[in-house]
Amino acid sequence: MASGTDEIVFAPLGGLGEIGMNAALYGFGPPGKRKWIMVDCGVAFAGADMPGVDLILPDPAFIEKNKKDLLGLIITHAHEDHVGAIAALWPRLGCTVYATKFAAGLLHTRRLAEPGAPNVPIEIVAQGSRLTLGPFEIEFVPMSHSIPESNLLVIRTAAGTVVHSGDWKLDANPGLGRSTDIERLKQIGDEGVRALISDSTNILRDGESPSEAEVAKVLSEKISAAKGRVLVTTFASNVSRLRSVCLAAHRAGRQIVLAGRAMERAMDVARECGFLDGVPELLGLDSFSRLPPNRVLVLATGSQGEARAAMSRIIRGDHPVKLSANDLVIFSSRSIPGNEREVNAIVNALILQGADVITDRDALVHCSGHPRRGEVAKLYEWLRPQIAVPAHGEALHLRVHADFARELGVKQVLVAHNGDMISLGPDAPAHLQQIHHGRLYRDGEVILPETDDCFRQRHRLAAAGIVTIAFAVTAKGDIAGTPDVLMFGLPTMTRDNRPMDEVVDRALFQTLDGLPRGKKKDADAACTAVERAVRAAVSNAWGKKPHVHVLAIEV
């Protein structure tokens, strides 16, 4: 490309090489003088291997340095993996956020209503509308998904048109909201598409995803046939599913009890947007105990095994909802990769309590909001892009999607990962430089870089525990009083059946007794000697080396 020539570039900060944490940058202009838009700003959820971490966020350092040229943040839809990082990261971006009414409402109630949340400027855009930001014209094309008002973005520039699919599927009967606008997609294809950046989540599966209408029919049958209480858990944002369950409960003569703040918020926003017209009154938890078993249906959060959500609390017995033998529990969801263990633990606990449990392995009680290969093929057929860049998936998904795009006749296919900057036009597509990218961790109310040493320390503590020792030394080098020893996370007995505290005490006192007065008066030297001796003694007795913290106080 000639120096100074305008080009359009794609630079993902998250979502390419992983499921979740979707955040992408599009730039237009010559190098060093580009204007930018950001598409989505989501989170990923930490697994059990990240103790203490609540959420994982994309690192916005690159665009933060260029924030004067950031024209706006465009939201495709309101799932947490697309909007969940906005409240935390917006102060580093400072731009206007553009979202549909439902996405804006859910963002306000879920994140921007939290104490200390920033006052984020949000402009409402309608599906089917167009928005001009500097050199970009962005069109919002309705797409079916597992949340209302999901959009594909058509990003038009002087260097060509790029289509960012967002999350989508083909569903002629999505239950509520607008279905995928196939005719508009064909028209866009006729206009000419330079590049397609598209969802890879279900690219490993053949055929097409089932419709929400099919799921609604099966749910209605299961709810109608139930004799005792019915509990349905699903994603709080899947308003179409929630509506289907509510209508099925009403037809079966059951009243609906909501269990979970996230679900209450989603239903409130959905009602404001007109998505719950005709849905009967929803009751609070205080109504549960007053309703006969065959006249109640509970809609509960926690389908992914979240520790603080309703489902986990119900099986622990610290929730107003109580289940009995032969009550029916329906998991109208699928486990997000990484959550399988937690979800299985809840399913097993329910079965041990005598409940009947139905999951998507047993019946069509859930369908994905993402396209399978048959649907992906149709999108390529309609849009006919010159360039394909797979997105929204792990490394395997991206590679399989790339191969599939080539099979479909796309001549120029690039596999990109977070931090890659890709030139999409007007010249031949190419990998440019890497940009700064990475992960930030929300740890309580603090946002920390992934390099913070506390995470390494927690892994070490989780694997081998900690021994804390404090003792006092006089100016003459004598030990004053009795040392204080605390142990956390160590077994109480050694492999040869000795009390572990005796092992620690023996190493501690032998070391102190053997130190010359001069070294005892040197707090650093005394602490180092005790630390090494105790760690070695525990290692010999246990086979693991604990973290040993020693404090010497001069008196």
Image (cartoon, rainbow, N blue to C red):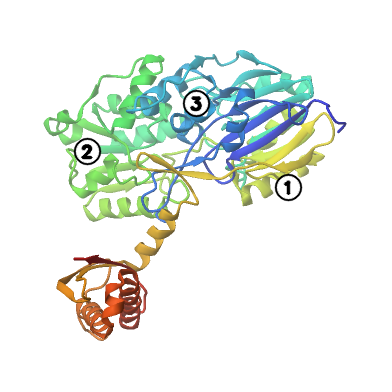
Crowd class of label 1 (few under 14; some 14 to 19; many from 20; radius 10 Å):
some
User: Residue 72, percent across and down?
Assistant: 58, 21
Instruction: Pick the quarter of the image with the N terminus.
Output: top right
Amino acid type, label 3 = Pro
> Which is nearer the N-term, disc 1 or disc 2?
2
Q: CA distance from mark 3 to mark 2?
A: 27 Å
Residue under label 2: 229
Residue 185 falls in which quadrant of the image? top right
Answer whether labels 3 and 1 touch (C-beta < 8 Å).
Answer: no
Position of residue 383 relative to residue 312, above or below, is: above
- The mark lying in front, picked from 1 and 2, is 1
Residue under label 3: 174
Q: CA distance from mark 1 to mark 2?
A: 48 Å
Amino acid type, label 1 = Asp
- Would you say 271 lies left or right of 387 here? left
Q: CA distance from mark 3 to mark 1?
A: 30 Å
Q: Secondary structure at mark 3?
A: loop
